[in-house]
Amino acid sequence: MSLPQPRPEVAGLPAYVPGARGDADRLPPVKLSSNEIPYPPLPSVARAIARVGDGIHRYPDMQASELHARLGERFGVGAERVAVGGGSVAVLQHILQAFAGPGDEVLFAWRSFEAYPILTSIAGATPVMVPLTADGRHDIDAMAAAVTDRTRVAMLCSPNNPTGPTLTRDEFARFMAAVPRSLLVVLDEAYVEFVRDADAVAGLEELERHPNLLVLRTFSKAYGLAGARVGFALGPVELITPVRACVTPFSVSSTAQAAAMASLEPVAEAELLERVDAVVAERPRLREGLRALGWDVPEAQGNFVWLPAGERTVEIAVALAALEPAVLVRPFAGEGIRVTVGSAVENDAVLAAMEAHRGA
Ligand SMILES: *Cc1c(COP(=O)(O)O)cnc(C)c1O
């Protein structure tokens, strides 16, 4: 008798490749592989997490009602227009569970966030991937043309992970005008706090215009809570309610809820956003430094830059990881390398290391 067999679309899945981590017997690495913020938690957030520890034998608030209410206030929508989950990747999984299944198509640009094809396949739906333009942007017209009567969900990633550019307001408007209202559009704004381009699409404003739009946000990047696992979607009640119905019970831990609540305290949030400003201030230095070394780095509106290293990708990433301390970046074999914008010292380390790996 054969062993239990997974569904074929699950058996065929590539493993999600996390950013590289350090080695115990070496110097702490310069970790620029997962787009994390380079600073430890604020003391107020660490204290809130510690306080929760004393009550950890209790289940969390299943509905995360305080957090829903707080986010609703913060973003000027009702709590019923918020769906919280264990990271925005989990929220996206619930969105796909709610809206797409076998026989349905899920459309997104490629290369983009690597969770998209994986979550689409887990939902049983078919990924439809539309190549980015040469400068790492969504090809909006090609994406609109790829919509069929089987397309249930379109994912737009702004700024795009891993290449960096945002969608402009015009591009977004063009896409929305070209697709039917029955198509669910998910705008993934994981890095929106780092955006400084006034032409960039702003999801919150667009929610007022489009009843078929969900905006995806996370505490993992700008708010420095990648390890806590909490993210959320904002949108109309009609779309949020089915997403909430798919959320795994108790999936946002009491620790994650407390960390998120503490981060939304006005004083804490202001301090967190100052850190974001510090990363944004470093971004042009890293990008221009790499451009000066001959690399054609696209516009960077997130906390990362993209090196289109092509066939040299793995060789360069391996060489950087062999340095002491290791410089850890995120290679996409045959395509390029994503480098997180770190602290000034970390960015100096990247620029120094890249002296030995010049572009064309
Ligand atoms: C990092 C990232 C997320 C956030 O994932 P979490 O599950 O919230 O940690 C979502 N979308 C994109 C494009 C990302 O890069």
Image: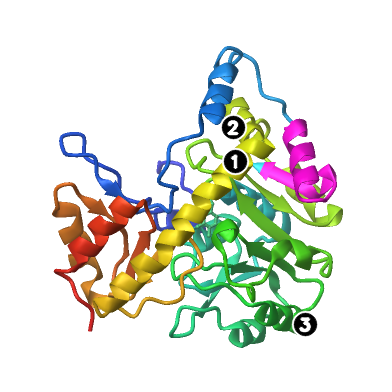
Disc 3 residue type (three-letter): Ala
Q: Tag 3: Cα neighbours inside 10 Å, few (<14), some, or many (≥20)?
A: few
Disc 3 CB within 8 Å of nearest ligand 1 atom: no
- Please tell me whether residue 245 is drawn above or below residue 356 in the rendered image: above
Asked whether, in this view, residue 108 is left or right of residue 73, the answer is left
- The label number, if any, that marks residue 230 in the structure image: 1
Labelled disc at residue 259: 2
Residue 94: x, y in percent?
66, 49
Amino acid type for the residue under numbered disc 2: Ala
- On-image quarter of the C terminus: bottom left
User: In the drawing, what numbered circle is on residue 177?
Assistant: 3
Describe the element under mark 3 as helix, strand or loop.
Answer: helix
Q: Is residue 190 magenta?
A: no
Query: Of callouts 3 and 1, which one flags the residue occurring earlier in the amino acid sequence?
Result: 3
- Label 3 and label 1: CA atoms lie apart by 32 Å
Q: Locate the N terminus and report the quarter of the image it occupies.
A: top left
The answer to whether the residue labelled 2 contacts the one labelled 3, judged by CB atoms less than 8 Å apart, is no
Query: Which marked residue is nearer to the observer: mark 1 or mark 2?
Result: 2
Beta carbon of the mark 1 residue lies under 8 A of ligand 1: yes
Quadrant of residue 255 within the rendered picture: top right
